[in-house]
Image (cartoon, helix red, strand yellow):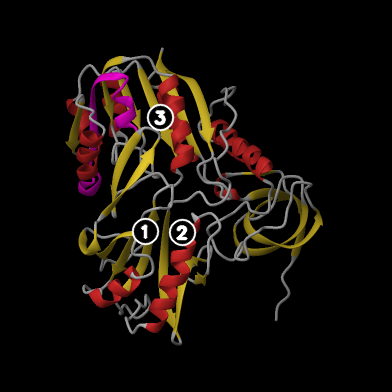
Amino acid sequence: MVKRKLYEIEIQKIVQKGYGIGFKGKKTFFIPYVIPGERILVESVRQKKDIVFGRVKKFLRTHEKRIEPPCPYFGECGGCHFQMVSYDAQLKLKEEILKDALSHIGNLENISVESIEPSTHPFGYRVKAQLPLKRFKGKVYMGFYKPDSHYIVDIEECQIQKKVISEMIKKIKEILQEERITVYDESKKRGRLKYCVIRCDTEEKSVLLTFVTHLRGFPRILAQRIYEIDREKIKGIIENYNPEKGNRILGEEVRTLIGDDHLFQRIGKYTFRVSSTSFFQSNPETAKKMLDFILSNLPEYRKGVDAFSGVGFFSVPLAEKIKKLISVEISKSSYKDLLRNVKINEMINIESVNADANKYLEEVENAKLILLDPPRKGHEQSIFKNIKRISPERIVYVSCNPHNMAKDFEIFYKDLNYDIEILKPFDFFPQTYHIEVCSILKKR
């Protein structure tokens, strides 16, 4: 067995994806699960020219904020990245990741960043879990993928999920273990069941279960047995058919097996219907803080556009400040929920549009406010052309990807003449490197 060379380095900072960066000669090292200031011995895992991805072999000096991770799967499961850091230090790391992105990606210096808003709960905050499945030598594995692999780490609970979700994971896995339903084998491209998606409301009184299948026909008798886990809390069991390869979890075809195909989330005074295939904030309690922040920092306007509205999470509250709000959503499922949520919350001044926001903005005139909450991949270039033509007074920009956000900010600032009026990060995703950022841009 070849003994790999070890490098002694000191971690300088944390960057996107939670990697710690250190240097040795001309080499730049990217190391997970470390804290700035720590001195370590590193083993190379893979290398491309002078970029080295490594793992810690030994700690020579540890940070005072390093703690024992409470989760037994941490470091093996790919869901969390910062459990080895005390929560107050996690928040500071995320502020530094954001500032680094603004400086090095967006080439924006001296940008004032407000203090990060902590999560209401550092653990037990998520209201949705998407769990891949595998059956190996008769045993059902249900959990999360190991980092940079398709190896499933089998779990009994997840500490960042709501308690009711962890309870469901354990009980559903026990039932699947006893049943004869086939589980999809990625290498052989056969088997029926691919994923189990568990959703709950913030009060943990309602649960929605979605089983993603490679072959149609999730057995109703099996759905009924799962329903018996908790007939009061389980509001619906759905089959989602997705025969496609790749990383996309949910397909377009949905069949309700038991109960409803949706549940309701209560955020402050607003109620939102959320269907099994619709997107909704994974940390609703902290997302409410962002809503309050936006509403408190915006004047009233005659006309505005929510360009990626989803089920109306931002649109419904914003309608109290905007006389006419156009909500644009491309997903049919989310659009259907949007229409219902407009009615549920009695917002008669919202016009809902099922369209691609990038194309729809070509038709928009005289909007004084545009809200942008794009997918993680960021904006298409056409959106900047449309915003330049519309020239709104303010833009509310929400992003879960500081890297792409910083690139967009450089365009807004240098090409479209917008200043960052206020910028505040929110910790929607404790124990991970992910950050949600809300900013308000104002036309110069």
Instruction: Kindly indicate the quadrant of the structure image that contains residue 302.
Output: top left
Residue 292 location, x and y as percent? 44, 27
Asked whether the viewer can see residue 414, the reply is: no
Q: Going 36% across and 78% down the picture, which residue do you hit?
A: 185
In the image, is residue 56 above or below residue 268?
below
**Residue 332 included in the magenta stretch of the image:** yes
User: Label 3 amino acid?
Assistant: Tyr
Residue reaching furthest right? 60
Name the N-terminal-most of marks 2 and 1. Answer: 2
Indicate left or right for 241 with 318 as reference: left
- Asked whether 182 or 204 is in front, the reply is 204
The answer to the question of whether label 2 and label 1 lie on touching residues, with beta carbons closer than 8 A, is yes
Q: Residue at x 40, y 29 (%)?
A: 397
Boundaries of the magenta span: 314-334
Front residue of 373 and 268: 268
Relative to 409, is 88 on the left or the right? Answer: right
Q: Nearer the viewer, residue 423 or 408?
A: 423
Crowd tier of the residue under label 1, counting other residues whose Cα lies within 10 Å: few below 14, some 14–19, many 20 or above: some
**Residue 145 picture location, percent across and down:** 49, 66
C-alpha span from label 3 to label 1: 36 Å
Q: Which residue is mark 1?
A: 233
Seen as rendered, the residue at the extreme top is 444
Crowding at mark 3 (Cα within 10 Å: few <14, some 14-19, many 20+) = many
Res 164 label: 2
Tell me the residue that label 3 is attached to: 397
Q: Name the amino acid, label 2.
A: Val
For marks 2 and 1, give the CA distance.
9 Å
Q: Is residue 192 left or right of residue 109?
A: left
Camera-near label (2 vs 1) is 1
